[in-house]
Amino acid sequence: MQVPDVASMRLLPVVLLLLCSCTRFCRPHYRKENEKKSELPPASDLLDTKCLAERHTHRSCDKVFCQPWQKCIGGTCLCKLPYQCPKNGTRVCATNGKSFLTYCQLKSFQCLQPDSKFLNSGECTGQEKFDVSLHHEGPDSVGLLRVKLTVLEESMYVCKDGWGMTQANVACLDLGNPLGALDTPDVARPDINIDECLHVSCRGTETSLTECTFTRRAGVQELAGVVCYNDSEAPPAEKAFQCVNGKRIPRGKACDGVNDCGDQSDELCCTRCQGASFHCSSGVCIPQQYRCNGERDCITGDDEANCGGAERPVTSEPNLLPLDMDTERKRIKSLLPTMSCGVKQHMHSRRKRVVGGSQAHVGDFPWQVAIKYGDGISCGGIYIGGCWVVTAAHCVRASRVRQYIIFSSLIDWIKPNTELHFRLVNKVIIHENYNGSTYQNDIALLQLKMPSLKECEMPGSVPACLPWSPYLFQPNHKCIVSGWGREKGNLRVFSLKWGEVHLINNCSQFYPGRYFEKEMLCAGTDDGSIDACKGDSGGPLVCQDVNNVTYLWGIVSWGENCGKPEFPGVYTKVSNYFDWIGRHVGRSLITQYNL
Ligand code: 4AZ
């Protein structure tokens, strides 16, 4: 670990010292190079073209959370099986006349068999009738929306207040249009006396209006108009944003927090957001109303951060239907299993934080482990829960499984502290596509031996969270690298050091032909003064989210020398290996939100 402070310098070999002081005078390169990239503006200055090419939709768990009746596999939200739903809830009735134990069970069933939609809560009686229709004055496709709810005798017009593309898309699905709505124009009221209408509010993920929230509004009001999507009336391609589902929407409607496409593809690749919307740092625009509403909408959690204790759990208006499905959705979400990772125990987090980086103390990096092989610590590693440690593939060999000792809570190798624990290794799993000459897929798992009959738990250790999406942290985010790094061949042992580095974009410019964007990431400082070095390999690069939860973002892998600004440290991009890790350790051990 190369850190520029004087105290640690004393411990570092002279060679390294010279290297560090030299690099301080080297011209910083990163800023200049990053600016070059923005000379190529995307089609619209709001949109990230590289991201658009990935064709994200509401089912991309790299970008958004899956629904509670879905699970995230290989970056896509897939249907859960009904039995994987939480058990408690109330019975609901589907359009196929069957009743289901819970809303989640119906939704997971519908996910597999899209024909059976939600009808209403409670048992099916065979009598309930739900209907959506368009009331036309003229011959064109514009109409006023009428809804017959199962709980009401008569059909009613929908109020214009609260009406928008989110609601209109759901209504057009009910009207048989898979691409939803084209527009929500103003439509003249019919001549008859209407002194009541239905106010409707949807999230946009519903497959029928029956799942939205309805309230009755008295008084003469403007009514909701809608035109469902048709290709001939849609804006021409040159003026349109092309949705992933094939729909074309006016270009100006992308990145405004409103899901105009219906598959959300117009809100998932945004460099910033316009109108009444909030920009998640993952590049997603969400409606401004979702900010500080008590529900995490951004995968990065930034919509619920800095709310000043003023989170307003939405007190929904009394719904006309006996059970509000949005409330039910949130309740199901809260029943899903949760896991604990990336949060230091209280004893430690009270410690004043060190600024500038250097010497670590017990509890500062409770996920950091040391791998002892031979006479000293050969590599770092990261505890990820259960019996599992992640490290770099180049650090371990399957044939040496019995020669490794894993230390946790270790600080000083010369003066072992009392908190120290150690474990032997049961199994070494090296990534099947690890390439020792290119360092591609430089990742390995160590399964620890259980001490007697107890679990693998190591007192004082806390697992680091694993990132399931490459969008959790962005370039320039400040992260921390830690380790017992030393010069190769130098048997002298150091204590655990840490340093702050930032994530560096576009790293192939530093390592042409050697840097693989999908599998690797770069981090460093402008002057190169903080860097990982030999012996830090296999150890953690961790980043904290807005809620101070720590994620294992990178594994120290390689780099040209150490502490050279023109050669930043290269790390294994952990998010790319989430599924691989899950396959070996069990998904439930590492999945936080999308299980
Ligand atoms: C190594 O040899 C090594 N400066 C690790 C990290 C870096 C360079 C070398 C990054 O283990």
Image (cartoon, rainbow, N blue to C red):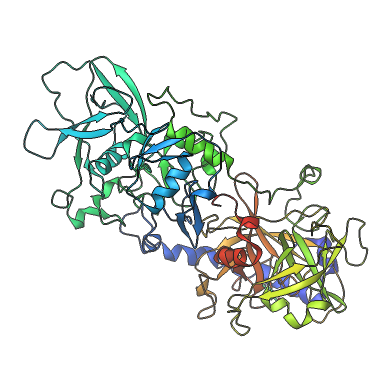
Q: Residue 288 lies in what quarter of the image?
A: top left
Indicate the position of residue 369 as horizontal and vertical percent values: 78, 64
> Eyeballing the image, is 351 above or below 515?
above
**Residue 17 horizontal side relative to residue 114, left or right:** right
Pick out the residue farthest to the front: 126
Query: In the rendered image, which quarter is residue 400 located in?
Result: bottom right
Q: In front: 453, or 276? A: 453
Image quadrant in which the N terminus is located: bottom right
| Front residue of 306 and 70 | 70
Location of residue 174 in the rendering, given as x and y in whole percent from the top left corner: 26, 41
Judge left or right: residue 589 versus residue 155: right
- Vertical placement of 432 versus 219: above or below? below
Q: Residue at the far bottom: name it.
A: 437
Question: What is the total number of numbered labels drawn onto the structure image?
Answer: 0
The image shows residue 594, relative to residue 522, as above or below, that is: above
**In which image quadrant can residue 28 be found?**
bottom right
- Residue at the location (81% across, 43% down)? 347
Quadrant containing ligand 1 reads: bottom right
Q: Measuring from the top left, give residue 307's x and y in whole percent.
A: 56, 33
Give the camera-side residue of 420 and 256.
420
Q: Residue at x 58, y 44 (%)?
A: 336
